[in-house]
Amino acid sequence: MSDVSFVRTEMLPEQAPPASEVGAIGWIRHNLFSGWFNSILTLISLYAIYYVLSGVLPWVFQSVWNANSLNECREIMMATWGSTHGHACWAVINDRWLQLLFGFYPSHLYWRPIVALLLLLVALAPVLYSDRVPTKMLIFSAIYPFLMVWLMWGGTIWGPISAALGFVVGWGVYTLVSKQLSGLFGIILGVLASVVWWLVISSYFASAMASIIPIGIEAVQSRQFGGFMLAILLGVVAIGVSLPIGIVLALGRQSDLLIVKYLCVGFIEFIRGVPLITLLFVASLLLNLFLPPGTNFDIILRVMIMMTLFSAAYMAEVIRGGLAALPRGQYEGADSLGLNYWQAQRLIIMPQALKISIPGIVSTFIGIFKDTTLVSIIGLFDVIGLASAIRADTAWNGIYWELFAFIAALFFVVCFSMSRYSMYLERKLQTGHR
Amino acid sequence: MTTLTDPPKEQFRLSMLLYDTRYRSATIQVIALIGFMLLAAWIISNTIQNLEALGKPVEFGFFGESASYDINQRLLEYSSQDSHLRAAFIGLLNTLVVAVLGCITATIVGVLVGVLRLSNNWLVARIMTVYVEMFRNVPVLLWIVLAMAILIEGLPAPNAFRGDNPTATMDLFNSVAVTNRGVYIPEFLFSRSLGDIHLFGTSSIRFDVSLDLIAFLIVLGGSIFTMRKVSAWAAAKQEATGDRPKIWHIQLGILFVPMIILLAALGFHLGYPELKGFNFKGGTHMRNSLIALWLALSLYTAAFIAEIVRAGILAISKGQSEAAAALGLRPGRIMRLVILPQALRVIIPPMISNYLNLTKNSSLAIAVGYMDITGTLGGITMNQTGRELECVLLLMLVYLCISLSISAVMNWYNNRVKLVER
């Protein structure tokens, strides 16, 4: 009997994996055709994509860019493709895009909102990318709000300067008093000094300075504001102001002081319980009733106030969520280090709570930016209001897809980049735990 | 031996109100309260002065006056001779109609999209992502106005259905007519109807309740009660013997047989819309404004609900389903007994707050002319009577009541399903 046992002495060469398991084919098999149900889903999706693209692509690209009215557009379409169906008439955007962006802002002054927008990006840089931009740039961010008001509304430069001086006066009084007496007195007197400055002195100061050194640019009325510019203006103000107010409200709601707590709860729940549109009705119809007789201030300013209050209430709830998510030990640790309330909040609690609530904060930002379109209902000409006006125009009567696609694209770009930025920020601040 | 002596009694000084932490909180609260009351008093006195100057004292008498405007989409009978209060009530019902319809559709679409976004199928997951991002990043007002524009400009006029060679045809076996004046759907009719009962006489909130509907609901309730009894019996039997009896066919029978018998007894049939003259007659007419609002709100909210559902499912750790499988549960049972109860705890609260958002967003009806509470009370009534203060405050109060009752439901649910921690 010969020995039939066989022992392999050398290893077999490694074989390439089967072609159906790797590469494009393997990926397709695993992700698209892994079973009969998945295959059906894939086929349905492919058909849906084909259906949508076959409608949209010719519509977008076989389109008319130069015409003065919808009828002219249709004539060109008939002449070129033999049908008016399935072709976009981008001529309306070509004709009106400046109006959609700037409203009725005087066309020779378009540079001002553009400069304000560019400076906004500069002012935001040290806030958004704190690790790459020098901290000294924050001084510019502090000046920016006054600069923006001056650029947008024009007029004399002394108005914004005297408003800014109110903060300087308050700060001066605070430092002076808190050295002499105590911090609490300093805060009270500082706030009082600012309020006195704004209510009593600032208008005289501004008019006096304006008559001595007249520096100014052409003034623009609020009713000339409109278009996407208005959405950005309202959005930036509401976002920028509501975050600090929201933090204060959230702290108030979490505090042990019963009366303060219930005032905050009442405010937050009231604002969150009513739709924004009713608050805008208040801005346009009632706010003047609530103020001393004879006061009549700008509709855009009134809308800004109501939108800020609205988003502050939502912000407060988001931040309260962040505060509640912090483990109790953080508060106790801060106490055991001997920090007082504000030190603990500033150094221990807020940095962590805000980090936890970034996604919520940004989605509140996106929400309030989208909600700026509601001002079209109380008669301001933002993009949607302008779109209705253009659709009512005899030249463009009957057009809607092109206009709304353009507007939707504007909002999509801004909101989508905000949500991407929040993801970047979450990744950057990720410390490995929580 | 030492004795404890009382610490020296401290004299109360005024500065302790500020520097002693025992008193400081009281000081701050008193200051806050006084500040708030001063602010409120200032606003109220300003308002009274301003209203006096305008010659419009606050009073609600205008609610009794005749509204003299028409509401074309309504649930209850209403004519332009009815009072403003009646108009507001009809508007409130319209708000609730669109809110309920929207919530149901948004939930169905949202859950579907949320689950599909987690699908293993790469293509389906991407398409759903596109849907979610597209709807979340564009204002809801734009969707509403766009939906209205599509319905008005893009759909055939009723006269396109006319003639021997109509350019448009009715859908779903000639029962639904989709026109640019609205959608006509079949209505429910009963040839042996039990009639109506009239509630609240001739007051502004009078409404008729169909006895057919009540009978239907009673039978449905009875069926559901019996079904629960049957499944309790099955569960008891499973506890006792270990075998779970098959009951699904019994359950279906209990649910449908009494219902069908009742409908047959009442002579149930559908009334189809028909083209007569220039327009469709018969059937239920849903106006474009209602459909645009409903579609836009539900598709918009569905994008948010999809994200909530996705997050809720992802929040349940894989160990849970593995542990359930290790206990020997079948996949369906794992889903129903282990995954869903935990996922729902995460999903329901944000879902309800989205329902709340949808209800509040339904106030945008005013942009497309749907007569909800904002369109009646905050729109035409306010413009006709010039009573801005009363109308806006009442409008806020109505929405606040709706919101607070939804939050109350949410808190009750939260407390019920709250994790009892060690």
Image (cartoon, coloured by chain):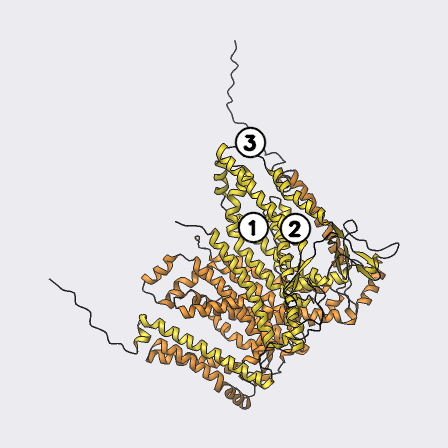
Q: Residue furthest left?
A: B1
Q: Which chain is yellow?
A: B
Chain shown in orange: A
The answer to whether any part of residue B139 appears in the image is: no
Name the mark on residue B310.
Answer: 1
Q: Chain of mark 1?
A: B
Mark 1, mark 3: which one is toward the viewer? 1
Front one among A306 and B46: B46
Residue at 61 percent of width and 45 percent of height: B223
- Residue receiving disc 3: A14
Pick out the residue farthest to the top: A1
Magenta-drawn segment: B2-13
User: Observer-nearest residue: A157 or A104?
Assistant: A104
Residue at image position (50%, 41%) is B321
Q: Amino acid at mark 1?
A: Arg
Residue B252 in which image quadrant: top right
N-terminal-most mark, 2 or 1:
2
Q: Secondary structure at mark 1?
A: helix
Name the residue beneath numbered marker 2.
Answer: B216
**Quadrant where the C terminus of chain A is found in the figure:** bottom left
